[in-house]
């Protein structure tokens, strides 16, 4: 093996083993509360370090795959690194570090129990995310996809109340049934039709299936990846809101939902290939379903009075942007989707952090109770406002870039209606996100609320950092763009 | 040379050991003796397998009497494979059994219990090893009678009725098989399987051969507990002492399945069974109904042992479904699942045995919160449960993969959909238990519960590790199943 190959292998193994080692250490020292918090943060730091060194390997490392072992004849557990995967790994491990600090602050401030189990599952979930990011074939992807579902289940059920258990059941039920019912069959079908499972630049399905079946297969993938929350398989996302807020942040901004859309993107680019989708029109049904999801979820978000539920529906809508970008299958829309993966992650994690901070400080969860709190919790609400504007897509914040490319993609694909749908959705974003910020700052707080102060430092600092990232990412965009150009879609 | 006598030693050693065991005093001695014997049987089966793998099928003539007059023992790839499964499970079960037998069975009966166990083992091994149709019946009766006795030793009085039910149904089944053997003997004048294989085709078309086929089918399906002949099984598994549940669940139905392969493929031949008499048309609907109904029934069971028993019925359905496809791929899938399921179900029943040591009940409600007090046992149950569902990296996934691949080969999409749908049902019944173990407060009287005895726990984990190992490196069962299928279809 070449030197480069060895360093790729080292890096990939390290990014899988670091979170696993963290989980084991936390299990071993579960009695020492302070120690497990240190281990938890240290693990996140290690992981970020490994991911950065992976970026430094440069573009020569792309498409070299590393085989661990075979579980079925001729289908190994294999990993490779490619631009999309590294990009996703960077987003996930970067935001995870911030989440760890926030989680420690939140869990302590709210006197949650079973901390060791909680941190341990968090680490295992990150291992699964890394596995998904670097997977070199569909089987590896599927294994880590399921591992992510299972490892996040205890996090959702964490509070052990009847509500939490019900929510966790819906969560597990929908994610497992879509993955076993649709995704697995799509994977086996792909294997049967092509005899390969490797993610290959340009796709592997060309001339392998008739157009109508291709359409069915694409739909099986899109729905089978339940984590992308395409309607009508989106119910798990609001149900999982019962989890403690750091989990919601991880679930709905970073690990789980982004794993879903990342899988959709990866399968679109490396299994189907965007040319094939365009020439055969296999993508049309999913385009319309994603558009409908995007608009309907925004409309539902308008109705929600629970802050976290509103954010959850907003997430469903934003995920549909990414799926839509993938389904449009033009180089601009893929670019937009990939960027949106990062920009939405940064924005939405901030919003969830804010929801958690508000809960920690006031125990309030309803939008209608938040009037005037902006004056009492200025940092939290300022961060909320910045993140909301970023998600709406106004400059100078990161979200503007991704929306730009998505609309550009819709126009290049000759689908003006979709471009208009993007604009309508933007207006809906404004309607459901902004009133919270406006009422928070402009209205007077109710008399009983005057004693409210900001949440503890460990909670407030991370959300200010992520709000700052919304701006930094806007400035960094040229570099990210150049990096993603390595995808070579033309 | 002792090596050439392995086929008979495999059966005769436990047979001779059984009466000796009954003479041993009331100490640890019977356990030690039976365990040693089972491990010797295990070593012999491994030797046999190695021999078969290098030299091909072994034929052993009892007392050197040549074939049509004397009894032949006939070990080919499929029998060697099933022998290994049965002896492995038996030796692990016996090793783990000491504490269980002390807890559940009156001290005066210990040596008799181990005698019955060894006789049951003898019977099962005999059925697999022999190449003589009448010998099959003899060993079938040995194994059945001893298992009736063992089931009746359960400490619940319902064990007596369960055993009686099994006695009646089992005797009917065995009688049907005997009638089938008799009819064949009448027509062909031979009992040797290889002889039968040749002569049946010379007299093809005789109604009595068809009648023999029908008697065999019903008799074996009764032993196999295929829907609708399954009524005896849930009670028998639920009320038997835990050692017996482990052993029977993992081996008894598997040996009946082996008999099915032998009769339909070796004696009658593939063409006769599937083309002339269309066995697939009977097995297919029955398997599908078995899978669906048993999975649904399992969901509503209040006792975990009954739940696992119904799950076994569904899993048997998967195995017969593979046969019903009437293709080589289907047969391979069936054999692989036979192997994998033996260890999965064995492991799960062992977990139940562990839980029983302190909770003294396997009703679902009584297991609440055991995850806290018995972490290792419950973790083992979770892994075993995941294997039962068919999660990747466990052997259950391999089974499911091959079964679905075989189904897709025939382009039966609806069937693939049913198989995947029923996996989701298994998610539900497994998860009911997992939720109970981890997310409920323990009952006060169980809060003193400790982890199961170390030897029992180690054996449980050994089974679990086997399951995981063959989920990661599946080359051994796949290779064995492939060569077994080749032998059967020749």
Image: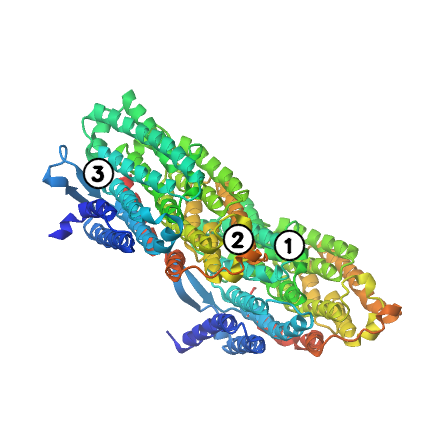
- First along the sequence among labels 2 and 3: 3
What kind of element bears circle 3?
A: loop
Residue at x 23%, y 28% (from the top left corner): B200
Q: Chain of mark 1?
A: A
Residue nearer the viewer, B143 or B251: B143
Residue nearer the viewer, B102 or A239: B102
Residue nearer the viewer, B40 or B327: B40
Instruction: Please determine whether, in this image, residue A483 is positioned above or below residue B431.
Output: below
Spatial separation of the CA atoms under disc 1 and disc 2: 28 Å
Q: Which mark is residue B367?
A: 2
Residue at x 72%, y 61% (from the top left corner): A308
Spatial separation of the CA atoms under disc 2 and disc 3: 46 Å
Q: Which residue is mark 3?
A: B131
Classify mark 2: residues with Cα within 10 Å, few (<14), some (14-19) or many (20+): many
Residue at x 42%, y 32% (from the top left corner): B229
Q: Chain of mark 2?
A: B
Residue at x 55%, y 48% (from the top left corner): B428
Whole-percent x, y for residue A476 in the image: 65, 77
- Quadrant location of the C terminus of chain B in the rendered image: top left
Whole-percent x, y for residue A244 in the image: 66, 64
**Residue B126 falls in image quadrant:** top left
Q: Which residue is mark 1?
A: A236
Question: In this view, which residue lies farthest toward the top?
Answer: B207
Whole-percent x, y for residue B62 in the image: 14, 40
What kind of element bears circle 1?
A: helix
């Amino acid at each position: 093996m070449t030197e480069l190959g060895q360093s790729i292998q080292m890096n990939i193994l390290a990014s899988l083993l670091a979170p696993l080692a963290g989980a084991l250490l936390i299990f071993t020292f579960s009695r020492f509360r302070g120690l497990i918090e240190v281990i938890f943060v240290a693990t996140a730091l290690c992981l970020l370090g490994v991911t950065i060194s992976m970026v430094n390997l440069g573009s020569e490392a792309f498409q070299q795959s590393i085989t661990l072992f075979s579980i079925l004849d001729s289908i190994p557990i294999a990993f490779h690194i490619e631009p999309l995967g590294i990009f996703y790994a960077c987003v996930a491990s970067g935001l995870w570090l911030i989440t760890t600090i926030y989680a420690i602050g939140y869990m302590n401030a709210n006197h949650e129990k079973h901390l060791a189990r909680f941190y341990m599952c968090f680490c295992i979930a990150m291992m699964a995310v890394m596995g998904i990011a670097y997977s070199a074939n569909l089987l590896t992807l599927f294994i880590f996809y399921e591992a992510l579902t299972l490892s996040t289940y205890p996090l959702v059920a964490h509070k052990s109340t009847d509500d939490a258990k019900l929510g966790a059941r819906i969560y597990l039920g929908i994610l497992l049934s879509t993955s076993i019912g649709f995704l697995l069959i799509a994977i086996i079908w792909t294997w049967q039709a092509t005899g390969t499972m490797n993610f290959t630049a340009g796709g592997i399905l060309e001339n392998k299936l008739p157009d109508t079946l291709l359409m069915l297969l694409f739909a099986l993938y899109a729905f089978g990846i339940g984590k992308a929350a395409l309607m009508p398989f989106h119910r798990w996302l609001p149900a999982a809101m019962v989890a403690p807020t750091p989990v919601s942040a991880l679930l709905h901004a970073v690990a789980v939902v982004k794993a879903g859309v990342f899988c959709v993107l990866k399968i679109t680019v490396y299994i189907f290939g965007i040319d094939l989708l365009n020439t055969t029109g296999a993508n049309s049904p999913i385009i319309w379903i994603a558009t409908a999801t995007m608009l309907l979820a925004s409309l539902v978000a308008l109705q929600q009075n629970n802050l976290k539920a509103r954010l959850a529906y907003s997430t469903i809508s934003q995920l549909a942007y990414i799926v839509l970008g993938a389904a449009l299958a033009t180089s601009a829309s893929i670019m937009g989707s990939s960027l949106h993966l990062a920009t939405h992650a940064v924005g939405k994690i901030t919003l969830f952090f804010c929801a958690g901070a508000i809960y920690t400080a006031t125990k309030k969860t309803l939008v209608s109770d938040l009037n005037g709190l902006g004056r009492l919790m200025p940092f939290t609400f300022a961060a909320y406002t910045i993140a909301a504007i970023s998600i709406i897509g106004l400059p100078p914040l990161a979200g503007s870039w991704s929306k730009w490319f998505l609309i550009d993609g819709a126009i290049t694909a000759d689908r003006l209606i979709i471009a208009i749908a993007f604009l309508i959705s933007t207006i809906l974003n404004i309607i459901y996100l902004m009133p919270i910020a406006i009422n928070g700052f402009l209205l007077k707080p109710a008399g009983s609320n005057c004693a409210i102060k900001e949440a503890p430092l460990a909670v407030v600092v991370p959300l200010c950092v992520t709000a700052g990232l919304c701006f930094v990412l806007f400035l960094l965009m040229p570099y990210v763009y150049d990096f993603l150009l390595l995808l070579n879609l033309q | 040379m002792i090596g050439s006598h392995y086929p008979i030693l495999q059966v005769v050693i436990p047979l001779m050991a059984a009466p000796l065991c009954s003479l041993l005093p009331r100490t640890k001695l019977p356990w030690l003796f039976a365990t040693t014997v089972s491990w010797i049987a295990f070593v012999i089966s491994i030797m046999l397998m190695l021999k078969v793998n290098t030299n091909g099928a072994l034929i052993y003539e009892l007392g050197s009497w040549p074939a049509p007059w004397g009894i032949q023992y006939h070990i080919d790839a499929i029998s060697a494979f099933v022998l290994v499964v049965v002896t492995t499970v038996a030796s692990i079960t016996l090793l783990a059994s000491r504490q269980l037998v002390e807890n559940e069975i009156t001290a005066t009966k210990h040596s008799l219990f181990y005698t019955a166990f060894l006789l049951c083992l003898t019977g099962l091994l005999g059925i697999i090893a022999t190449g003589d149709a009448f010998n099959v019946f003899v060993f079938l009766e040995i194994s059945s009678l001893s298992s009736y006795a063992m089931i009746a030793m359960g400490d619940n009085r319902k064990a007596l009725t369960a055993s009686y039910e099994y006695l009646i149904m089992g005797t009917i089944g065995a009688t049907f098989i005997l009638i089938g053997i008799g009819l064949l003997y009448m027509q062909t004048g031979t009992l040797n399987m290889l002889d039968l294989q040749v002569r049946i085709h010379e007299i093809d078309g005789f109604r009595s051969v068809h009648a023999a086929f029908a008697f065999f089918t019903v008799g074996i399906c009764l032993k196999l507990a295929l829907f609708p002949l399954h009524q005896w099984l849930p009670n028998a598994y639920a009320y038997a002492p835990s050692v017996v549940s482990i052993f029977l669940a993992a081996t008894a139905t598997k040996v009946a399945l082996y008999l099915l392969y032998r009769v339909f493929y070796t004696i009658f031949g593939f063409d006769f069974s599937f083309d002339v008499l269309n066995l697939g048309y009977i097995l297919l609907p029955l398997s599908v109904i078995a899978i669906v109904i048993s999975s649904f029934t399992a969901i509503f069971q209040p006792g975990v042992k009954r739940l696992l028993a119904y799950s076994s019925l569904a899993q048997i359905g998967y195995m017969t479904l593979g046969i019903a496809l009437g293709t080589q791929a289907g047969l391979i899938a069936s054999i692989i699942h036979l192997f994998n399921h033996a260890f999965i179900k064995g492991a799960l029943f062992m977990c139940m045995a562990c839980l029983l040591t302190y909770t003294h009940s396997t009703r679902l409600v009584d297991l609440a919160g055991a995850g806290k007090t018995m972490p290792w046992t419950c973790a083992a149950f979770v892994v075993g449960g995941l294997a039962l569902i068919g999660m990747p990296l466990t052997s259950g996934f391999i089974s499911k993969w091959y079964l679905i691949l075989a189904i897709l080969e025939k382009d039966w999409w609806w069937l693939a959909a049913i198989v995947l749908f029923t996996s989701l049902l298994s998610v539900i019944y497994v998860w009911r238990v997992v939720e109970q173990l981890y997310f409920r407060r323990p009952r006060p009287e169980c809060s003193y519960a400790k982890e199961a005895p170390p030897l029992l726990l180690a054996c449980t984990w050994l089974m679990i590790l086997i399951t995981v190992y063959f989920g990661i490196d599946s080359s051994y069962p796949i290779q064995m199943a492939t060569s077994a299928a080749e032998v059967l279809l020749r």
